[in-house]
Image: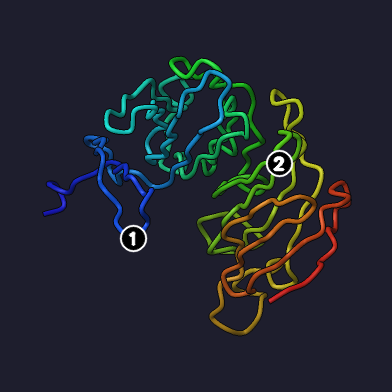
Amino acid sequence: AQTSARRGVELYDVSDPRNPRLLSFFPTGPERRGVHELDLVTNRADGRVLLLLATISRFRLLDVTDPTNPRQLSYWSLAEQTGEAASSSKFVHSVRASADGEVAYLSYWDAGVLLLDISDPTNPKIAGRTGSTVTGEGAAHSVSVSRDNRVMLAANEVLDPGSSTDGYSDWGYLRVYDVANPSSPKQIGAFLTANAHTDRVNGPPDSGTYSIRDAHLQGAFGYLSWYSDGLRVVDLGNPDRKSTRLNSSH
């Protein structure tokens, strides 16, 4: 039954939210997991409405200006476009667009976060990337970017720290980047809960999972969902501080 699963994305008219109406379906074909995460761009200067898809094996970019007729403009993968060796630990987990729809931020797991110039959506080009070492900036799960494209929050999800296979010494946590120059993202801060700065062997004597999951940037605050450490709100008024102040928790 799995081989015949319908993989792709559906577009709905929700002008009447009580009665959503299906407008179209775009199939992603043989993609192993179909669409994992997506983002919608509605305010580009050229008037195009773009749909950005993370389908694990690659990034797809659709024109949905006419939502009844979605058209794929391009697709992109690290191995196919750069020749970097393919790896099961390097995949497109998530995608977010800049507020102006000119840059796509791909959370590419152990390849780090890739910044793509999508000013020409038919020809995405890599503009920059964060570092990607197994003990540093791997496990890139998702990001959130300020409206002025200067600050990026990256949630790095590590679920089994201290194991014999993953090489991570801490649970996953938040990293803060200066991305004003997309060709050279610079880490300027980080936030870990007390539990996240441990591993399964030396951490709390319980079965909790102390990794970050997602981050959302709103103004000067980061809203962070943590598996077993609740919701954290961090003050990013001065993101250069290495120990970001905890404003409230749980």
Precedes in sequence: disc 1 or disc 2: 1
Q: Position of residue 177 (x, y in %)?
A: 74, 41
Image quadrant assignment for residue 167: bottom right
Q: Closer to the observer: label 1 or label 2?
A: 1
CA separation, marks 1 and 2? 32 Å
Q: Residue at x 54, y 49 (%)?
A: 141
Q: Position of residue 234 (x, y in %)?
A: 77, 61
Q: In terms of depth relative to the viewer, which is nearer, 230 or 175? A: 230
Residue 103 is left or right of residue 32, and the answer is right
- Residue type, numbered disc 1: Arg
Which residue in the structure is indicated by mark 2? 146
Which residue in the structure is indicated by mark 1? 18
Q: In terms of depth relative to the viewer, which is nearer, 24 or 156? A: 24
Q: In terms of depth relative to the viewer, which is nearer, 61 or 116? A: 61
Q: Position of residue 138 (x, y in %)?
A: 59, 45
Q: Residue at x 82, y 59 (%)?
A: 235
- In the image, residue 136 above or below residue 67: below
- In the image, residue 164 above or below residue 53: below
Q: Position of residue 149 (x, y in %)?
A: 71, 33
- In the image, residue 182 above or below residue 168: above
Which image quarter is the N terminus in? bottom left
